[in-house]
Image (cartoon, rainbow, N blue to C red):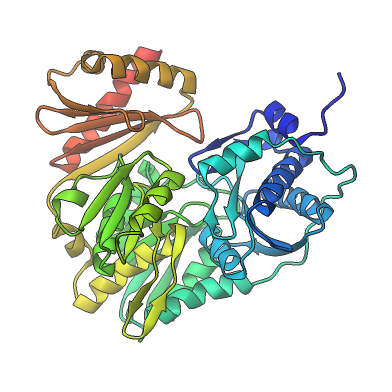
Amino acid sequence: MQPSHFTNDILRQSGIAFGTSGARGRVEQFTDQVCAAFTVAFLTTMHRSFAFERVAIGLDRRPSSPAMAAACTSAARALGLGVDDYGVLPTPALALQAMKEGVPCIMITGSHIPFDRNGIKFYRPDGEITKQDETTILNAKLALPASLTPEREPTSDAANEAYADRYTRWFVEKPLTGWRVGLYQHSAAGRDLSAYIIDALGADVVVLGRRDEFVPVDTEAVSKEDQARGRAWTEQHSLNAIFTTDGDGDRPLLGDETGTWLRGDIVGLLCAKALGIEALAVPVSCNTTIESCGAFKKVVRTRIGSPFVLEATASLADSYSSVAGFEANGGFMLQTPLEHEGRRLTALPTRDALLPALTLMVQAARKGQPLSALNKALPERYTASDRLQDFPTEKSRALIEQWSANPEQLLRDLMMTQTVKAADTTDGFRVTLANEEIVHLRPSGNAPELRCYAEADSMERANTLVRKTLEKLAALAG
């Protein structure tokens, strides 16, 4: 059987699928041909709705990313397009530059997943691709150019510079003067850019944990090692805050003066309040304090994944002047531009790590308060999350189907004595118990993992719910 040279066949045979944030797979699946097929299908799809002559490309620090960027570059050139290579940079910085230039962009990144995997994120000239775009890309039957020579273009710093300018113009008068901010750099794409911006805002930046090899930092499931590092670093260096991101810089992890990492949905909530956002869209997994705090005129709950959140924020923008969204991982999406005292912050409808982290640090600094004081002002409702790794997606889906048909079965599987008050199948299976505690289970959209989210009236209880739930499910699967 002759190998196919049509994009849909190549992509189907690769086994790579779209998850909640781009196409993800094992490194060996992203061959030059597969990367070229994705590029041809994506750019041809974009040409049906947009006129452009160039495409922007960026990448994270994974060892496999440069070769993938070269393959995408060769395919774009074969279509007659110019390529602007912005090198290693945060995903939101690349998206911001591409939207400014009115061109599509391709980001080579696997975000927080292990280094033996990678991925590609695609952006239209007006923002993230939609779920319909994903289907069109996978099903497009297009001939792959016969001759492709993977080779990158010289890199430009323009996108990094524009991203830095965005925040140094919005936060004026060095508001972090007197603060010591620990920057956990690991292998984050924007580690040096973050240091530059935080320094420009007046803080004394303490560089921590810089690594040459790739480190997969998951802002939703913070490792015990990173929890211990946060506390130790804060005490050792007398820090006011500690900050890091996932691998491609679109999800923040912000710690307070005690070294305690704040949950991403709480960071998003506090940021939205500080910015005066009227209407929000958030995934179903986020903390219910978002509604109970009474800060917003409208809150819409969606499936998990930025495309679903952005679909909802776009709809809200028809009725409200200031609209945003965020996820439990902390990624903040600004749907509408903001204006304050003659300054303008342009919309950035994709996950961003810097806006929420900087907003909270600046707010606390200007109030003369510790960062923890912002969190303590909210109703006491706590969320926790973790995951079972190497848990087959098929097994996760089968269990969720069983629980959806019979919610009480979940409680029996978990050996819980509570009764079910309400069940939600918006994304996975989320059950509210009679005592108002919440357990939410769903398969990851990016890897063979079963994620568990829990909500309770204390952090200790939320953590216990997650731990016991995953222990029971691991034993059930074993």
**Relative to 404, does residue 264 appear above or below in the rendering?**
below
User: Height in image: 22 above or below 251?
Assistant: above
129 vs 84, nearest the viewer: 129
- Residue 369: where, in percent of width, then height? 19, 72
Horizontal relation, residue 366 to residue 208: left or right: left
Residue 203: x and y in percent read 37, 77
Count of numbered tags: 0
Residue at position x 35%, y 63% in the image = 356
**Residue found at the very far right of the displayed protein:** 147
State the image coordinates of residue 398 (x, y, percent, origin top left): 41, 16
**Vertical placement of residue 344 versus 49, above or below:** below
Quadrant housing residue 433: top left
Q: Position of residue 478 (x, y in %)?
A: 41, 13
Res 103 → quadrant? bottom right
**In this picture, residue 118 sits left or right of residue 150:** left
Answer left or right for 388 relative to 142.
left
Q: Which quadrant of the figure has residue 13? A: top right
Identify the residue shown where x is 68% and y is 28%.
12
- Residue 434 is left or right of residue 370, and the answer is left
Residue 389 shows in the view: yes
